[in-house]
């Protein structure tokens, strides 16, 4: 049974995003320890779980990126939660309006790898 892992990038002073929602400060050196840690995390990941707005933002970035994280981000299965019936133009995406708890429990039963949100 996989475990649920919550991965959040946040600065030491609690900063997550600019008022306009941009996350431009998250650009990382591909040779950095942070990049290596992210690649290691994704190496043990079976599914990425996000909401539809985050999925749309991630798809826009990762689908055209040549960063080392792009390959796992584009190929790993993504489960996108949305009550609005959206379509996400990205590889390996399943959109669900199902209950969060039920879907996570199902993923845990089906895959021994981690579920990353």
Image (cartoon, rainbow, N blue to C red):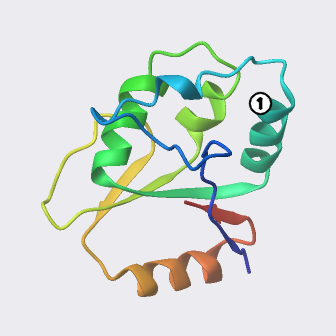
How far across and how far down the image is residue 76, in percent?
A: 58, 45
Q: Quadrant of the N terminus?
A: bottom right
Q: Quadrant of residue 115?
A: bottom right
Along the horizontal axis of the image, is 12 left or right of 24?
right
**In this view, which residue lies farthest toward the left?**
84
For this rendering, which residue is in front, 15 or 98? 15
Q: Residues within 10 Å of mark 1 (few under 14, many from 20)?
A: some
Q: Quadrant of the C terminus?
A: bottom right
For this rendering, which residue is in front, 61 or 112? 61
How far across and how far down the image is residue 54, in percent?
A: 37, 46
Along the horizontal axis of the image, is 71 left or right of 32?
left
Count numbered badges in the picture: 1
Which residue is at 63% across, 42% downward?
Answer: 11
How far across and how far down the image is residue 69, in percent?
A: 66, 29
Along the horizontal axis of the image, is 83 left or right of 44?
left
Q: Secondary structure at mark 1?
A: helix
Which residue is at 87% across, 31% downward?
Answer: 33
Instruction: Reply above or below: 68 against 94.
Output: above
How far across and how far down the image is residue 34, in percent?
A: 79, 34
Q: Is residue 90 visible?
A: no
Q: Is residue 48 visible?
A: yes
Which residue is at 24% across, 71% downward?
Answer: 97
Which residue is at 71% across, 21% downward?
Answer: 68
**In this view, which residue lies farthest toward the front?**
13
For this rendering, which residue is in front, 14 or 36? 14
The residue labelled by disc 1 is 35
């Amino acid at each position: 049974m996989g475990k649920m892992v919550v991965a959040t990038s946040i600065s030491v002073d609690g900063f997550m995003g600019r008022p306009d929602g941009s996350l431009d400060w998250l650009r990382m050196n591909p040779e950095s320890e942070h990049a290596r840690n992210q690649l290691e995390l994704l190496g043990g990941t079976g599914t990425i779980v996000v909401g539809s707005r985050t999925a749309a933002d991630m798809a826009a970035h990762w689908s055209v990126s040549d960063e080392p994280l792009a390959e796992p981000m584009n190929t790993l299965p993504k489960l996108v939660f949305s009550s609005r019936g959206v379509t996400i133009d990205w590889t390996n995406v399943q959109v669900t309006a199902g209950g969060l708890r039920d879907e996570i429990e199902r993923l845990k039963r089906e895959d021994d790898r981690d579920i990353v949100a």
